[in-house]
């Protein structure tokens, strides 16, 4: 492919002007700065490294917007979950592939180049395994292959309905596995993603509600060195149930008993004490934050200001962002929501930036980029020689970006975000988005609409 030339690019050492990226075999072969465009260079505005989406339930894209009505009782996460269970009861493997492909198109169009798929819809509607244990995982892999997004597949172990090995609810039957069958599912999932050149595999014990302490220890040892993702402390009821079960809060228990380290990503971790906040930051784990979903479900507000404040040794908490329920898919919106929740809570502005890095957009972007790569088991190389050519080009002529330079581009993208800001995207060197639209958006959209016609008409 021709070399890519950008007016400006965010390199590991900071912003640079007139940057040429030479791409070969899906990776950046060379980076030149301060060079005019050659005649055959493909020319663009501002280049950023693609972001990792650390937490997605792809199938939930199909129900986005369908739960925004008040029921006969007060609505919360638990009433939303009941509606979600009814929706997923209808989903076939073909439906899963169609919905996931639509979600992945939207991720690529907005600047995500890799997704961590927290995948727990394993079995048929009766709760029986498919002939291929990884049938549904294979459909996720097919959607990733079709769209071009990078995939970190995170098969989920869901074994129980609440703390202490409580029986599962009927709506959870499609998720359930024993540890032995889950181990077989993990190996089948490895086969399902084998054709994707840079896909990788982790494990995801769903939560302390869904696995026992013994099961957690077994599952996290299945793939040494691989990412481990777990829901933790999303809801106050979950915290109360954990205290009743163990005398400890979920994050407190995990930090004391599970060997949480840099492999781990604790999803949400919304309800933390100051001691838990400090300990989680010091552990080296990533907090997987999903501000749009957390707001949509009324979860609460993560204590980001404290988590990202340097401790006495200068240690800062690590975080990534995820789209979770996929009610809206846009990394700029996720980052904006993270900062705005702090502003509303603390009644202050530019809460998560610092004197050392005064740009709030720049602080949020680089934190999410580095933490996201760690959470999905990827090297955090950025736009550098040897790195995967996962590149996002912002349209510098967009009204909200025009005339901005350096971190002001990131501030504008995050806080003045609007459709069309992302112009082009390359994934592993392959152009997948042009003019703000995925190259297969029309075909994939038609299939998605046919799928919803059947699901919503059932």
Image (tube, rainbow, N blue to C red):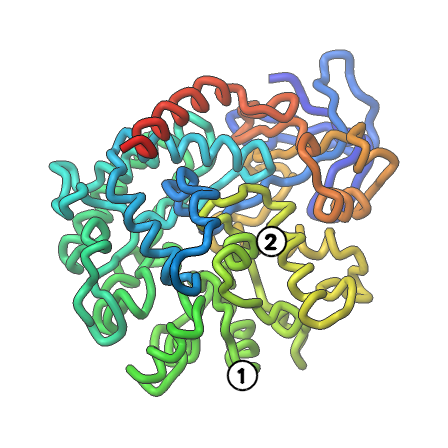
**Quadrant showing the C terminus:** top left
Q: Distance between the Cα atoms at labels 1 and 2?
A: 23 Å
Q: Write the residue at 36% across / 30% down.
A: 452
The residue that disc 2 covers is 368
Residue 309 is marked as none
Q: Write the residue at 77% across / 68% down.
A: 348
Give neighbour class at mark 2: few <14, some 14-19, many 20+ (Cα, 10 Å): many
Q: Is residue 248 visible?
A: yes
Of helix, strand and loop, which one carries label 1?
Answer: helix
Q: Write the residue at 51% across / 79% down.
A: 276
Report x, y in % for residue 131. Answer: 11, 37
Residue 75's image quarter?
bottom left
Residue 216's image quarter?
bottom left
Image: 14 above or below 104: below
Image: 16 above or below 439: below
Image: 308 above or below 2: below
Is 177 placed left or right of 333 in the picture? left
Is 171 placed left or right of 146 in the picture? left
Of helix, strand and loop, which one carries label 2?
Answer: helix
Report x, y in % for residue 132. Answer: 15, 37
The residue that disc 1 covers is 275
Looking at the image, tell me whether mark 1 or mark 2 is earlier in sequence order.
1
């Amino acid at each position: 492919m021709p070399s890519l030339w950008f007016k400006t690019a965010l390199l590991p050492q900071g912003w640079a002007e007139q940057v040429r990226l030479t791409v070969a075999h899906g990776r950046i072969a060379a980076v030149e700065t301060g060079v005019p465009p050659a005649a055959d260079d493909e020319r663009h505005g501002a280049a950023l490294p693609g972001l990792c989406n650390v937490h997605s339930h792809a199938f939930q894209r199909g129900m986005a917007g369908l739960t925004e009505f008040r029921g006969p009782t007060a609505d919360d996460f638990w009433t939303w979950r009941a509606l979600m269970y009814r929706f997923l009861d209808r989903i076939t493997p073909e439906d899963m592939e169609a919905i996931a492909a639509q979600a992945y198109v939207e991720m690529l169009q907005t600047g995500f180049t890799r997704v961590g798929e927290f995948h727990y819809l394993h079995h048929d509607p009766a709760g029986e395994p498919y002939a291929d244990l990884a049938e549904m995982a294979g459909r996720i892999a097919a959607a990733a292959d079709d769209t071009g997004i990078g995939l970190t597949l995170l098969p989920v172990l869901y074994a129980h309905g609440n703390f202490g090995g409580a029986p599962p609810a009927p709506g959870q039957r499609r998720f359930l596995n024993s540890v032995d069958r889950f181990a077989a599912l993990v190996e089948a999932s490895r086969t399902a993603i084998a054709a994707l050149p840079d896909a990788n595999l982790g494990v995801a014990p769903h939560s302390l509600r869904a696995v026992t302490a013994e099961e957690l220890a077994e599952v996290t040892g299945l793939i040494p060195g691989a990412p481990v993702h777990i829901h933790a402390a999303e809801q106050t009821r979950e915290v109360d149930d954990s205290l009743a079960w163990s005398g400890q809060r979920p994050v407190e228990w995990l930090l004391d008993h599970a060997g949480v380290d840099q492999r781990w990503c604790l999803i949400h971790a919304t309800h933390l004490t100051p001691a838990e906040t400090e300990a989680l930051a010091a552990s080296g784990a990533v907090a997987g934050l999903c501000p749009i979903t957390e707001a949509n479900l009324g979860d609460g507000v993560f204590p980001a200001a404290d988590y990202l404040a340097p401790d006495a040794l200068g240690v800062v908490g690590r975080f990534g962002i995820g789209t979770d329920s996929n009610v809206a898919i846009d990394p700029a919106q996720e980052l904006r929501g993270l900062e705005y929740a702090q502003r509303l809570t603390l009644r202050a502005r530019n809460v998560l930036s610092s004197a050392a890095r005064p740009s709030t957009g720049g602080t949020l972007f680089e934190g999410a980029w580095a933490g996201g790569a760690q959470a999905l088991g990827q090297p955090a190389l950025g736009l550098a020689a040897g790195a995967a050519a996962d590149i996002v080009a912002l349209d510098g002529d967009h009204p909200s970006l025009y005339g901005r330079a350096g971190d002001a581009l990131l501030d504008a993208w995050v806080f003045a975000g609007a459709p069309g800001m992302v112009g082009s995207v390359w994934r592993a060197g392959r152009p997948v988005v042009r003019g703000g639209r995925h190259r297969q958006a029309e075909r994939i959209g038609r299939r998605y609409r046919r799928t919803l016609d059947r699901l919503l008409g059932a």
